[in-house]
Amino acid sequence: MNEGLRRRRAARITGLLLLLALVPIGFLVLRDPRVKNWIKVRVPHPFDRSETLSERVAIRFFDLGRIGNEYRYDPVAYLLTRPNMSAVWEWPEHATGQLMMDTNDIGMREDNPIAELRPGPRVLVAGDSHTAGLVPNRESFANVAEALLRNEAGFEQVEVLNAGVAFTGPTCYLGVLKKYLELEPDAFVAVLFAGNDFADDIFLRFALDGWSMPRGSKEYHHRLRIGAEQFPEGIYQGFNQAYRWVHFQAEAERSVEIVTESFRQMGALCAEHGVAFLPVVLPTKMDVDGDDDAERQASLRNQLELSEEEVAVNLRSVQRVVQVLEAEGLRWLDPTEAMRDHAEPLYWRMDYHLNTAGHALVGRLLAEELRTLLARR
């Protein structure tokens, strides 16, 4: 056997032995939760990726078996509120002691059907449960803005349609725009909630990319479970997202990219159809309500081992999105400073959603922006 052949054969054997040695190392690396999380964040599933959310996946993702009495799957928007619905809850913090949830014939948080022929300028508003409102329809910031504008000359027939849907995020807001383009809105408003919209969008991306949700350690889930038992309203309206970003930093970075792209696509679709686009920032109670309910917040931060700086990551994520898109020419309405300057709390203590005063303030600021936006048209 000549020398060259022996060398090639020896090289093959060495390569094979090296490959066999690397297999268990690779297996151990892939078992590391941080590695698996990075893969799921950055790499679509090779066999199960989808461009749209099927009804089967949506039922599982939105837990429609639990919430389905009030919500329904939609192939375009993914989740919508059911039409012609009416519900009443006890709510001691509201002036009436109760809250009413009513939807119109297409499931919007409006008391009346949408007119087939537009009586005047029409504005479509998308967002999550804060936009839909844990207040009577007339008190939601969309309807507050409509009422204020209708008192002004030239805007007597304006419509500001509240298409907010709980449990949704920016990808779904894009779907709402696509679904209701047939209503021929003059303007589209999309409200980015700092407390959970980033998590909502990346979790939906996992579902679209065919991945299961990355899980943390036993300690991670234990602390989260105890926190949710003690203070669920704080968990779901900002603390859970901040807590997750501390432990899943790759998700935090990717979520900003995904949300930025969701809003970029909304802007492009609005431009294509001649619709004015107004994105709006909505901070959390922790961002603007000062010391209101500070003791419970401190207790939950302690349970999750979070600093105030780590909780503030939610609003910093919003600011990163705004900075990128404003550099591309997209103007935002950010009421954060006006909300911080407001004397009374703007969120319910019961569940940390915008209260009546919060909707009134955001509605007034929204009306001012829409007045200018619609006058240009």
Image (cartoon, helix red, strand yellow):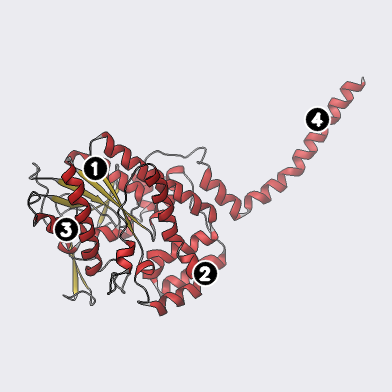
Q: Callout 3: 10 Å neighbours few (<14), some, many (20+)?
A: many
Amino acid type at circle 2 is His
Amino acid type at circle 1 is Ala
Amino acid type at circle 4 is Arg
Q: Visible in this render: residue 206?
A: no
- In the picture shown, does residue 6 fall above or below 107? above
Separation of marks 1 and 4 at Cα, in angstroms: 64 Å
Query: Quick check: marks 2 and 4 in contact, CB under 8 Å?
Result: no
For disc 1, the marked residue is 276
Separation of marks 2 and 4 at Cα, in angstroms: 49 Å
Separation of marks 3 and 1 at Cα, in angstroms: 19 Å
For disc 2, the marked residue is 222
For disc 3, the marked residue is 143
Find numbered disc 1 in the image and state the secondary structure of the residue it sits on: strand
Q: Callout 1: 10 Å neighbours few (<14), some, many (20+)?
A: some
- Closer to the N terminus: mark 1 or mark 2? 2
Choose between 291 and 225: the one closer to the eye.
Answer: 291
For disc 4, the marked residue is 12
Query: Quick check: marks 4 and 3 in contact, CB under 8 Å?
Result: no
